[in-house]
Image (cartoon, coloured by chain):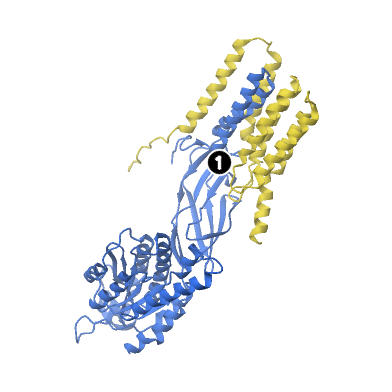
Chain colours: A blue, B yellow
């Protein structure tokens, strides 16, 4: 890459502070007809020019390798930026701003090493979170910090996934069987996993791993193995992304929790080779059709990261009507909605009417409400009780249409998993 | 390590003690040369400026280290005007500015290591410029207005070069050939 020497080069705010200081000294010297302050101004005038001249020639994009670690809500990001010849790690200024969904536990730290720059950020997720962290910004700076130049960084954004650990227990669940027509069962599918079913002539796109070498030796043509997998059912994760009366901030927080939990639930079912679909209902329904496999997980994750709370609330019926174009009725539907308004309960009615057996996982808005507008200490108990009673009434209203799990503690889905394994839903369908 | 202890350690590193020592030493020497109302006032001015600059460096976490110039420049102005016009005070004025730049370079932060050791590349030109100015002030007879105007034009031209260099956009590169 032949970038010119001056590409992106700029004077920083420090240079203008130097020039302002020099101007003050010159003014003082001229006003008092005294040359002494002028000699103080000379280095301040020349330093920014020297900084620009010290800039290195353009370099190739810096390669970054980074990962995240940490249990529960802890998010520790560590990485290394490879520094090409011609640049020194100490000349790099790296910045990685903490996303608003997370909290900074310790200041962002960089460690210059030989030929690379290590960095480490320690954040904390107060609630389940799913977000994509953009690449860090890297800038060349001279020693005094008077001039700078942004440098390109090559790498992939980092995805942070933090969801309740109980989600892992969902995998063994026997879902309601998906039946396309009465009397016809299509639960058995052929693929690369399950029990051996037979062999067939290989196609060009078949991987070599599945080749049946003995059949090839006997027949002279390449054959591959086929496996049959008993699939008990499909899952649709349905996120209500309509704005509610709770306000934009609480809506965003609860939707962030819903997104993170949705990818956790999807992960658990996909590990068991089940098909998982996704629907996000904002102003319109956006769906990811049912699918399985690792690439489908990436598809779901990308769709969830891109999903946002809509600006306009749509009528509840639209959320069920639009769904039938891509998702087969009869698919077990997990609706994640805070049930803040009457419209959310209506959505359950419309989903059930159109043939989607629905379970509602409802993140409670109470923790966010009390955090945003904390009541006075003497009123706290009364206010909390009233808010809880109102919430209980909303949940009870929704219960008349579908089973609802009131989700108060965001880092635990024990109630949800216990309900699916042993609760009313399990008894009803077994 | 606890976050609070970590923050204290970082604040300590932010202070840039070598730069602080250099800037304070030069100002104290400057103050000792002050005439009326006396070196005591000069010392007080130097101490207040140095303490304020140190507080600017340590206390706020995200304030730029170059802001140490805010208290230092008025102090230099006062000390420069209070000192007699001699070669020594002119040298001290130039050294004061250079020591402040050293202090700005000595800015260890969590995102960037201190640039003190490699500050020589940037500080060489200002030092040479100050030396040339001192020699010129010593050798050129007083009353030569034309030389003063020429020097002013030179400084203005240098500043213009800096601004032009800073605003240059990257050149559009030719597409790579497939051959």
Q: Quarter-wise, where is residue A354 in the image?
A: bottom left
Q: Is residue A11 above or below residue A77?
A: above
Q: Quarter-wise, where is residue A288 in the image?
A: bottom left
Please state the horizontal and vertical placement of residue A204, each as a whole percent of the image.
Answer: 26, 67
- Which residue appears at 61% of the width and 23% of the height? A27
Please state the horizontal and vertical placement of residue B72, each as a whole percent of the image.
Answer: 67, 34
Q: Is residue B57 visible?
A: yes
- Which residue appears at 65% of the width and 31% of the height? B73
Mark 1 secondary-structure assignment = strand
Quarter of the picture holding the C terminus of chain A: bottom left
Quarter of the picture holding the N terminus of chain A: top left
Instruction: Please count the marks in the image.
Output: 1
Q: Is residue B84 above or below residue B7?
A: above
Q: Nearer the viewer, residue B88 or A377?
A: A377
Q: Residues within 10 Å of mark 1 (few under 14, many from 20)?
A: many
Q: Nearer the viewer, residue A267 or B59?
A: B59
Q: Which residue is mark 1?
A: A141
Q: Nearer the viewer, residue A197 or A427?
A: A427
Q: Is residue A167 above or below residue A37?
A: below
Q: Is residue A140 above or below residue A271?
A: above
> Image check: A329 left or right of A110?
left
Q: Quarter-wise, where is residue A390 in the image?
A: bottom left
Chain at numbered mark 1 = A
Q: Is residue A221 visible?
A: no
> Image check: B130 left or right of B162?
right
Please state the horizontal and vertical placement of residue A293, each as a whole percent of the image.
Answer: 35, 71
Please state the horizontal and vertical placement of residue A409, each as a whole percent of the image.
Answer: 48, 74
């Amino acid at each position: 890459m032949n970038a010119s020497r001056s590409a992106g080069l700029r004077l920083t705010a420090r240079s203008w502070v130097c020039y302002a200081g020099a101007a003050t000294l010159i003014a003082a010297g001229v006003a008092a007809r005294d040359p002494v302050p002028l000699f103080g101004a000379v280095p301040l005038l020349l330093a920014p020019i020297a900084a620009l001249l010290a800039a290195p020639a353009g370099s190739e994009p810096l390669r970054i390798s980074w990962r995240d670690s940490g249990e529960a809500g802890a998010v520790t990001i560590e990485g290394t930026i490879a520094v090409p010849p011609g640049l020194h790690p100490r000349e790099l200024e790296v910045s990685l701003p903490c996303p608003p969904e997370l909290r900074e536990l310790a200041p962002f730290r960089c460690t210059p090493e030989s030929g690379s720059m290590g960095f480490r950020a320690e954040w904390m997720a107060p609630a389940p979170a799913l977000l994509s962290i953009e690449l860090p910004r890297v800038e060349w700076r001279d020693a005094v910090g008077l001039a700078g130049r942004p440098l390109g960084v090559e790498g992939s954004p980092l995805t942070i996934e933090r969801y309740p650990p109980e989600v892992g227990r969902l995998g063994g669940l026997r879902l309601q069987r998906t039946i396309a027509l009465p009397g016809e069962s299509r639960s058995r599918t052929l693929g690369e996993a399950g029990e051996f079913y037979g062999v067939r002539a290989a196609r060009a796109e078949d991987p070599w791993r599945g080749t049946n070498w003995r059949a090839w030796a006997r027949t002279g043509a390449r054959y591959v193995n086929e496996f049959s997998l008993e699939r008990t059912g499909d899952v649709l994760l349905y996120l209500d992304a309509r704005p509610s009366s709770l306000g934009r901030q609480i809506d965003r927080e609860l939707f962030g929790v819903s997104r993170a939990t949705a990818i956790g639930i999807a992960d658990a079912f996909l590990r068991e080779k089940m098909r998982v679909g996704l629907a996000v209902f904002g102003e319109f329904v956006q769906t990811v059709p049912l699918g399985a496999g690792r690439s489908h997980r990436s598809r779901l994750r990308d769709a969830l990261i891109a999903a946002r709370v809509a600006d306009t609330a749509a009528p509840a019926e639209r959320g069920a009507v639009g769904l039938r174009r891509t998702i087969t009725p009869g698919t077990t539907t997990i609706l994640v909605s805070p049930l803040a308004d009457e419209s959310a309960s209506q959505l359950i009615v419309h989903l059930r009417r159109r043939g989607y057996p629905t379970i509602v996982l409802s993140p409670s808005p109470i923790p966010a409400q009390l955090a945003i507008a904390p009541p006075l200490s003497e009123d706290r108990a009364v206010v909390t009780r009233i808010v809880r009673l109102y919430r209980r009434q909303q949940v009870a209203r929704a219960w008349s249409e579908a089973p609802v799990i009131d989700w108060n503690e965001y880092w635990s889905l024990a109630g949800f998993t216990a309900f699916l394994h042993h609760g009313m839903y399990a008894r009803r369908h077994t | 390590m606890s976050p609070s202890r970590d923050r204290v350690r970082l604040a300590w590193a932010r202070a840039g003690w070598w730069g602080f020592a250099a800037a304070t030493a030069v100002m104290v020497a400057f103050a000792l040369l002050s005439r009326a109302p006396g070196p005591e006032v000069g010392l007080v001015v130097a101490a207040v400026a140095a303490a304020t600059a140190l507080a600017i460096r340590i206390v706020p976490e995200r304030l730029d280290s170059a802001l140490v110039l805010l208290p230092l420049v008025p102090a230099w102005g006062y000390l420069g005007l209070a000192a007699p016009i001699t070669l020594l005070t002119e040298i001290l004025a130039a050294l004061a500015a250079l020591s402040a730049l050293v202090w700005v370079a000595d800015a260890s932060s969590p995102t960037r290591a201190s640039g003190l050791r490699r500050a020589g590349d940037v500080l060489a030109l200002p030092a040479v410029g100050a030396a040339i100015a001192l020699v010129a002030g010593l050798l050129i007879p007083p009353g030569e207005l034309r030389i003063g105007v020429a020097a002013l034009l030179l400084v203005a031209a240098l500043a213009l070069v800096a601004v032009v260099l800073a605003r240059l956009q990257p050149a559009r590169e030719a597409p790579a050939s497939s051959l």
